[in-house]
Amino acid sequence: MHIRKIRLLTPGPTPLYPPALHAMMGADIHHRTQEFVRVYKAIIADLKEVLGTSYDVIPLACSGTGAMEAAVSNFFRRGDRVIVCSAGKFGERWVQIAQAFGLEPIVLEAEYGEPVPAEAVIEKLSSTPGVRGVFIQACETSTGVEHDVETIGKAVAQTEAIFVVDAITGFGTMPLDIEGWGLDIVVGGSQKAFMIPPGLAFLTVSPKAWKHEESSDLPHYYFSIRKEAKNALEGQSNWTPSVALLLALHAALQYLKQVGMAKLIENARLLAQATREAVQALGLEVFARKSPSAAVTAVKAPAGMDSGVIVKGFRDRFGSIIANGQGSMKGKIFRIAHLGYFDFPDLFAVIAELELLLAEQGLPVEFGRGVAAAQHVYAKAALQKAAVAH
Ligand SMILES: *Cc1c(COP(=O)(O)O)cnc(C)c1O
């Protein structure tokens, strides 16, 4: 049709919270002023509240990968033996960063679409002496798979190793008890469930991780986490911070506090369930069979069809930007996100669009079948009477 609204529906960047965007226009403040100190301290306090931890939280001006790199370069030593759980492209990124800094990663690899089983990590930990760290993705965004961070964290807590969790799409989509589960370093990014543009990341640091930091011998300069933590106490960052994004984060955090993390997570989990039921009602298959994530649902393209056709159809016909598969999964899956500032009307539209696109490709589609499946999930969760009626 003739009017097409652009809608960002990828698992990062995600839809933006409008008051956060407006807050960015207040960025004409200098970062070495009391005005900035106040807001920076408030952001760190709010982050701790939303993440449910009293550990240090260090914001960084970089994308999520920068904070992943900082988690390696500040807390490990050359030659450290570490276990990396790799279930997709982001797990492979941990391996590459570890190798770039001279660590010796032992890689526990899961097939794309599968999680690394907690038992495999526990077994490897007990059969390997001297492990200094365990790395994982809470949610592996490239395949739409969630890991059992709780079981693994509690096992790592019994050892000398620190547990380093990329929760960039885990935050806001799954419960993460940082202190209760032994999550020593947890990495987050702005453009996922935090509802603001890319360019900010942060990490949390446990006392056990700070002990590791004391003996770290790896080179770093921009990402000097000890110095950041010290400056943060004074409401300052090491370098010129991303003032505009921090103001956006400040606004988004007020909203997240108002909604509450538990409800944000429930929102994502219901949308994920509705997405799975909708695509299955349309005869499609969810890529992650065992442990599908609440951040993003990866869907297999119909037999004989390149998923790029669907991704392109979403964009060209409807202005909806959804994600293709990454790496070798490109062309095989498409990914529908539902983390952060997503609601059921977003999902109803996506599923209705998908039905039209499948029909355009000549597949036998009964219009409304997928949408109805999503509506049933909504009704059961939110409408008492409708739940009884169905
Ligand atoms: C988005 C994402 C990242 C970070 O990617 P950047 O492009 O550096 O922000 C890292 N890990 C996961 C699981 C992600 O989803």
Image (spheres, rainbow, N blue to C red):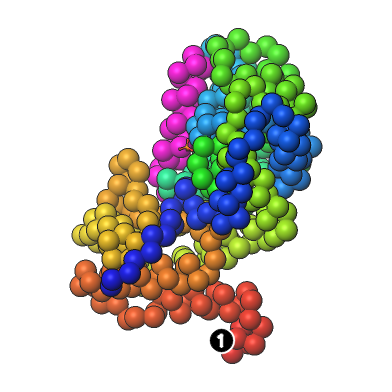
Task: Classify 321 as above or below 79.
Answer: below
Residue 95 appears left or right of 184: left
255 and 87: which is toward the camera: 255
**Residue 268 rendering spot, x and y as whole percentages:** 57, 60
Residue at 33% x, 69% y: name it: 3
SS at mark 1? loop
Quick check: 197 left or right of 307? Answer: right
Instruction: Look at the picture and state if 128 lies above or below 61.
Output: above
Q: Which residue was labeled with disc 1?
A: 390
Instruction: Specify the quadrant of the image occupied by residue 184.
Output: top right
Residue 191 placed where, x, y %?
52, 45
Q: How many marks?
A: 1
- State the quadrant of the C terminus: bottom right
Determine the image quadrant of residue 58. top right
Image spot of residue 206 (x, y percent) = 73, 29
Which residue corresponds to the image point at 51% horizontal and 58% vertical from the top-left? 338
> Which stretch did the figure color magenta?
86-114
Q: Amino acid at mark 1?
A: His
Name which quarter of the figure residue 232 lies in: top right
Vertical position of residue 219 compared to residue 50: above or below: above
Q: Residue at point 60% right, 78% down?
A: 380
Magenta span has 21? no
For the N terminus, give its image quadrant: bottom left
Decide whether residue 108 is among the magenta residues: yes
Q: Is residue 222 visible?
A: yes
Q: Nearer the viewer, residue 371 or 102?
A: 371
Residue that sits furthest to the bottom in the current view: 389
State yes or no: Cβ of the residue under disc 1 lies below 8 Å from any atom of ligand 1: no
Considering depth in this image, is 382 or 248 the residue closer to the camera?
248
